[in-house]
Image (spheres, coloured by chain):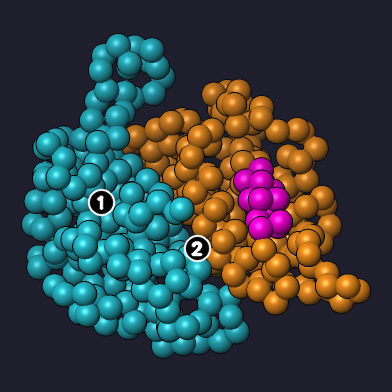
Chain colours: A cyan, B orange
Amino acid sequence: MTRSELLEVVYRFYPRDLWVDSPGYDETPERHRRVTAARRGASEYPTWQAMLGRLRLRYWIHDLSLHILGGSVDCAYAVQLGVRAAEAEEAACPDRPGFRLSSGCCVSLLGPYYVVLPAGSPDEAPRDLAREIEATYRGYQPIPPEIGTVVVPDVALDDRALGRATVYDCLLSTWPWLPLRPQRG
Amino acid sequence: MRVHPLAVSWTILTASCLQSPTTASPEADATMAPSLEQSSAAERIGEAAQAAYEHTFHFVVVVDDDGNDAGGGWQSATATLSFVTWRGILPYYFTCPLEVGMPMRSRVHGRISPAYAARITAEVATDVTDSLEPEQDWQGRGVVFCAELRERMKKQLHEAPYQVPATVKRP
């Protein structure tokens, strides 16, 4: 996986030098490809759901991909993974599960890529999650931060101005709970 | 140079809302979870601002909450916010179409009713517009404003006091 390979994928799905609110954006072939990929993500949702079913046996989960089923155009599935919090914490909040966010991931709908966070954590959850993704989605690879955080200067997203979107943003997520990009200065 | 929403106070001038086929029942609004009603987010702002925007974002159920997991279900609202800036006597009008989505239940809040979703979205839209407005000259730069608006709304909804895993996209 190289930077230029990933940029090629980005440019296949995002028109260059065009804002998403500019006239004609929806008619670009890149946008059409992205809509098609999101529709495919909806039709192949059972595969994602089955993976979550296996993870559910070991973790609390919160699937954040349901909007794709509703027709929203997004670039990746996403899930938050939690573990049971300490008993004392749970006792203080008896009406809600003692959920402590321990990991999360995005699996791209635009190519065979994923990211699991927090990377390099001593916890078992991120490694477990990566194993489950690679068993479910054969050939998928994690995008390393040194490539993922590269800015794609001529691509705009719904919520990223030109000059601000990274490879991670374009192919995986702009979820704020996934710290995939340097904080804004 | 100032950006003005084309009606009610700052943000929103006009709002055209689209509804997906499945609509939340009135009962769902009426049974707002007490934990949300008492949240600091709801208490933080005045009632006048809440009232203005609750009519702008009409959240409808996209996927029902099955009651499992740490959070579930999905609801969304689509609206087009309209703005105007003035250079001398010449107005510059632009619009920002938004699709805001969030779960119907989250690990932090428990149940999120469509009414609460509408209220916090309205609060955030107002806050972000107010913060963006003095930063730059937006004349002729509506597309930039819209991208910034969506990014900051999404970020703010994720942060305290809201802490809702929301999406803010172009429909």
Q: Say whether residue B163 is left or right of residue B34.
A: left
Amino acid under disc 2: Asp
The reply to whether label 2 and label 1 mark residues of one chain is yes
Label 2: state its secondary structure: loop
Q: Residue at x 57, y 38 (%)?
A: B113
Kindly report the distance in space between the C-alpha atoms of the residues bearing marks 2 and 1: 20 Å
Q: What stretch of residues is rendered in magenta?
A: B123-135
At 18% from the left edge and 61% from the top edge, which residue is drawn? Answer: A144
Name the chief secondary structure element in magenta.
Answer: helix
What percent of the width, then of the height, locates residue A124?
11, 37
User: What chain letter is assigned to the residue under label 2?
Assistant: A
Q: State the mark number for residue B21.
A: none
Which of disc 1 and disc 2 is earlier in sequence? 1
Q: Nearer the viewer, residue B31 or A156?
A: A156
> Vertical placement of A4 versus B26: above or below?
below
Residue shown at the point (61%, 73%) measured from the top left: B143
Name the chain under label 1. A
Numbered mark located on residue A159 in the image: 2
Amino acid at the residue labelled 1: Cys
Q: Position of residue B116 (x, y in %)?
A: 61, 38
In the image, is A121 to the left or to the right of B26?
Answer: left
Q: Alpha-carbon neighbours of circle 1 within 10 Å: few (<14), some, or many (≥20)? A: many
Using the image, determine if residue B79 lies above or below residue A176: below
Residue B146 is situated, as x and y percent measured from the top left of the image, at: 61, 65
Q: Is residue B124 magenta?
A: yes
Above or below B134: residue B158? above
Which secondary structure lies at badge 1?
A: strand
**Residue A123, located in which quarter of the rendered image?**
top left
* In the image: residue A155, left or right of residue B93: left
- The residue beneath circle 1 is A105
